[in-house]
Image: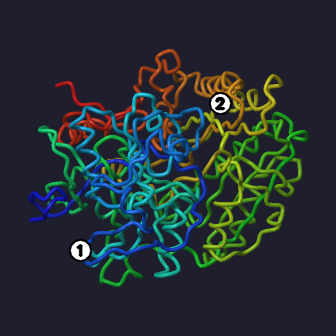
Amino acid sequence: MIEDVAGTATTGASDNGGALGNGGASDHGNALHDGGPADGGGVTGGGVAVGGGTVAEPLRGRGGITVTKADRQYEDLVSGLNQRYVAAPDSVRLVSATEEVVAVVQEAVDRGKRLAVRSSGHCYEDFVHNPEVRIILDMSGMHAVGYDPRLNAIAVESGATNLRTYQTLYPEWGVVVPAGFCYSVAMGGHVSGGAWGPLCRLHGLVVDHLYAVEVVVVDAAGRARAVIGTRDPDDPNHDLWWAHTGGGGGNFGVVTRYWFRSPGATGRDPRALLPKPPEELLVSAVSWPWDELSRDEFVRLVRNYADWHVAHLGPDDPARALISQLVLNHRSAGQIGMLVLVDASARGAERLLASYLERIGEGVTVERGALTRHMGELPAMPQFAAPRRLPWLQAVRMLGTTNGVLNDPTLRAEYKSSFMRAGFPEGQLDALHAHLTREDVTNPNISVQLTSYGGRINAVHPAATAAPHRDAAFKMLWQVFWNDPADDDRNIGWARDCYRAVYADTGGVPVPNGVTDGCYVNYPDIDLNDPGLNTSGVPWHDLYYKGNYPRLQRIKAAWDPLDVFRHGQSVELPTA
């Protein structure tokens, strides 16, 4: 028997926990945060982790620190990465312990106030920063990372960013959770959405290593409490754990911490509980000048990328040591860019990289050169025109932190996604080329990014976790950045037009079939709800969750029967 935070006993081992992070976090594509190892008291034998830092005691109440419009820091706490969405809540609550989360959630329920949860503010849509939200629960103060001997697992609080997590786990124990690129994305929403990362082909998704989760939930009587759930199949809370292995943020409760231990890991040494990243990475960054590429060469380049990944998507393929991102920038950016990372310890690593570059450029007469311009969230990297070796953590820190785009406080953005199971039909390639060369749009921050999938991700059955896209070869991200609100319609319109044209044969969206396989929940796109933009007959939830959605609905009914945790694409309560 375990005690919940509110002080009442809950039966069963701590399995599955549940909840959400920032209401649909994003991955982006790079990893890491600017801080070092977690501050403050670490995880203790009792499994309770305390966030770092101290605050003036008079400011902190039972529900943490309260910030209102009367406080000068308010404006800094009511928007996130995407400045299209700014909230006006009655208060923002900064918490540093699970009991404070319980108190805030209970207050929201008792007062009938709409609650949203923010771990890092990277949600692509308005699921957190929404005008209907009255209380924003800010988890950034819960950022501890440490070993918990009680569960024999690495505990990571939901406010810990990718970088903080990497810079604690790797220097101390030489291990890693295979999380995302973007340094400032926090684990709360990132993990609950499945959590793709650059080590995925070697080690699978982050959720493939998730052992337990602690979630603050609300029962049918309106009582908030914290529950721990594990992946142990006999755990009575197992379904709640499963829901947080890809069921998305903002659906079931508030995730306060995750515990990670790889399946099959033995012993009690933290150095043996999680995967080890490559000691070194072989890094290559190249580009092709847009002005020299013909339509046929563009098509050949993109087709080569897709075909290579389809040929090497197997979980045991030796080429899983390589991961690559091809960034199809708008012609106004001047270049198409590609980043390649290879485990330098893999047998024949240099040969693998050389053969990959040769294959991608096959049939393209334009010579590849240095990547001299930033692309998406990646910086210009002319120093990697010839491949170079870098220690793993140095490479990840560089890739995750050296682009100022994500730190631009005027950034506005639009995103769309797809999973690809096979190579591109001719019509999709035609549509990509047509829209990336449109002359009525001259935004160099328009891109369609193709990113490696497959490898060990595809070793897991689609129903084993809530993340169902287990036979995709690569994924795609439509990403548009701009700064002036007057340009909203032009840029959003470009993304919608391009996306709808690429998937014109399937109702404007990438329906699950032999070629495409739906969308990535960590790149949420509210347009999927719109019957004018999604004419496929396949609802948004099936694009994200496929056949796993009915189970997610049953879990929603069991753990959030009052629908306290909701947003524009939250899991719906079953109708019958």
Which residue sits furthest right?
A: 292
Marker count (numbered):
2
Which image quarter holds the N terminus? Answer: bottom left
Q: Secondary structure at mark 1?
A: loop
Foreground: 89 or 513? Answer: 89
Q: Which residue is under mark 1?
A: 46
**Numbered badge on residue 58:** none
In which quarter of the view is residue 358 placed? bottom right
Q: Which residue is under mark 2?
A: 428
Q: Amino acid at mark 1?
A: Gly
Foreground: 50 or 73? Answer: 73
Residue at left offset 24%, top offset 34%: 111
For residue 19, side relative to residue 167 (left or right): left
> Residue 23 in the image: x percent, y percent?
41, 42
For residue 481, side relative to residue 461 (left or right): right
Residue at left offset 83%, top offset 25%: 439
Q: Specify few, some or many for label 1: CA neighbours under 10 Å numbering under 14, 14-19, or 20 or more.
A: few
| Mark 1 vs mark 2, CA separation in Å | 54 Å
Q: Amino acid at mark 2?
A: Gln
